[in-house]
Amino acid sequence: MSESTLTRPNTTQPVPALPRGRGIRLGMKRIGYEIKTYFRVGDQVFFTFLFPVVMLSIFAAAFSASGNVGTNPDGTGGITQGAYFLPGMIAAGILLSGVQNLAVDIATEKSDGTLKRLGGSPLPVISYFIGKMGQVFVTSLAQIALLLLVARVVFSIELPTEPELWARFAWLYLLGIVTSAVLGIALSALPRTGKSATAVVIPIVLVLQFISGVYLMFTMLPEWLQNIASIFPLKWLAQGMRSVFLPESFASLEQNGSWELGWVALVLLIWCVVGLVLCRFTFRWIRKDS
Amino acid sequence: MTSPINVAQTSAGLSSSPVVEVRNLVKRYGAQTTVSGVSFDIVRGETFALLGPNGAGKSTTIEILEGYRDRTSGDVQVLGVDPQKGDLAWKAQLGIVLQSSAEAAHVTVREQVEQFAAYYPHPRDVDEVIAAVGLTDQSKTRIGKLSGGQRRRVDVALGVVGRPQLLFLDEPTTGFDPEARRHFWDLIRSLKAEGTTILLTTHYLDEAAQLADRVAVIAAGRLVEIGPVDTIGGADARVPVVRWRDAAGLRTERTLEPAAFVRALSAEIGEEPRDLEVIRPSLEDVYLGLVSAADAKAADATSATHATGAAHV
């Protein structure tokens, strides 16, 4: 073949521009797709979606004989074990729906070729993330609704009625789920393969749950462990959720004798920003040249 | 090839301006050079096959054109855009069928094709695409339950649903049964008839012979031959071979006049030659000849001192 000289047509543009506003519209479309696939994966539904409900049921049943928490000196009053651990389970659910779900999901999609295919299509990255965030919002709200329903109906746990407590729940939930989701996306960069994703992610999440007052009363932990747990967001989210679902008198049982909602907001916000920065610098459709 | 000078493109786009231009493409990974100085053009509407043994640099080349890999040096333009700077509007004009994939096991064929169709500004009809790849009966089946060949057809469906100007097919028919391969060829011919430019890599030489207007052979990162299917390798490589058996064993003779040779042969031995065959070298024979010649040359080059920046054919 004779190598023709490199003369490029510099007139017309063979690539027409795309319409504006595709990112949001396609993001909405991705949400439906993501939710559909979420509920079709059996182990995901069990280990992420139903896990807090299962744990709450086990706790409420297993410790029903060990008496109430926060009783008066004469043994009266207080709340059941199930009621005491409910807010921790809600916080754990938020962590699972965001961190565990997205970290495993995205790491798997990275290794099975999903992201490579999407990266070769005209799908905007933002649409992909809108889809993931939408999936996290919908599944975590459904999870919390189920948790509260089981708590109220099966275990007769009293739920708060004051609107200001539900308003507090709303901001804790929103800040918690967004932080959890961005940390999940950031953590998805860690596993080298899809197969190792659960092995990398689940232990991290499980250890956090044990040291953050989800399954064990936080103040029972040694102080050094409390200090380590205080670096991470789950301890604060669980504490915030206890302020919503437990009687005001229980504030005295906390590490510093109060709910510390200002610290809760601050620590979650810092982790949210850290997560966003990590996502921005670590997320790629594919690892080029790997 | 014609040299394009400021060809104004119509929307029909049937000009001969190159859709793909590759000049002196080089890709290195550390000390290893995977692609060393490859150049070619693909014009609009052409079906171009890239052939070569495993590890020759075919997939690296195609992934550089798709924007998945960055080149080390050289000049690449795909639809007038440097793939390293390709944006979403550029991607909307491409169809990419990658080599292997195992994703999306939990959605049905139709859900997946419909999802991808939405990403493109002027997609093809979802059911027509599913029918074209022969999966109408499986359209409500989850992709995880399909056979390997059927999954491959889903990949092809996702590659063409966006009505691409340029379609990349990286070993598209691996795992197809012969009938599915014939259907696939018909599909590719109909895309070509609509003006789609196609870049194909394949291990099946008959597939390249069936579909491609031109082929390029890559061996050890270098382009060893390029041209229309029926001329590559030159006239010498296509000289027919007469083969027969006599007391000495299997005999072969290469001749441009096989009929005359056979007549003379049978007159000489006075009977019908045993196991007589007249063979016209297929694309596969030509290809194997080119690749083994390139391998021998590469071995010579490495045993001699390094010839830096050696020009390809």
Image: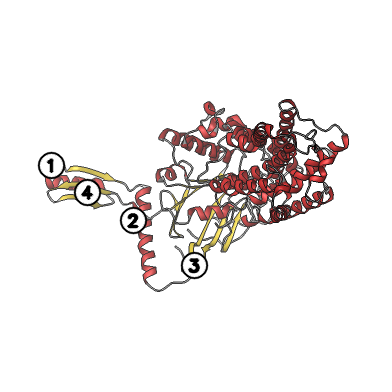
Residue at image coords 12%, 46%: B269
Q: Is residue A137 left or right of residue B50?
A: right
Q: For residue B236, which numbered disc appears in the image?
A: 2
Dot 3 or dot 4, earlier in sequence: 3
Between the residue at mark 2 and the residue at mark 1, the CA separation in whole angstroms equals: 30 Å
| Number of the front mark, 2 or 3 | 3
Dot 2 or dot 3, earlier in sequence: 3
Which percent across, then down, holds residue B185?
A: 47, 38
Mark 3 touching mark 1, by CB under 8 A?
A: no
Between the residue at mark 2 and the residue at mark 4, the CA separation in whole angstroms equals: 17 Å
Mark 3 touching mark 4, by CB under 8 A?
A: no
Dot 1 or dot 4, earlier in sequence: 4
Residue type pointed to by label 3 = Ala
Residue type pointed to by label 1 = Glu
Residue type pointed to by label 2 = Asp
Q: Name the chain under label 3.
A: B
| Number of the front mark, 2 or 4 | 2
SS class, disc 3: loop
Q: Residue furthest bottom?
A: B305
Say which quarter of the image contains residue A141: top right
Query: Where does label 4 land, which residue?
Result: B261
Q: Residues within 10 Å of mark 1 (few under 14, many from 20)?
A: few
Query: Where does label 3 land, which residue?
Result: B31
Residue at image coords 42%, 35%: B177
Q: Residues within 10 Å of mark 3 (few under 14, many from 20)?
A: few
Task: Look at the picture and state if B119 lies above or below B59.
Answer: above
Which percent across, then down, holds residue B280?
A: 31, 46
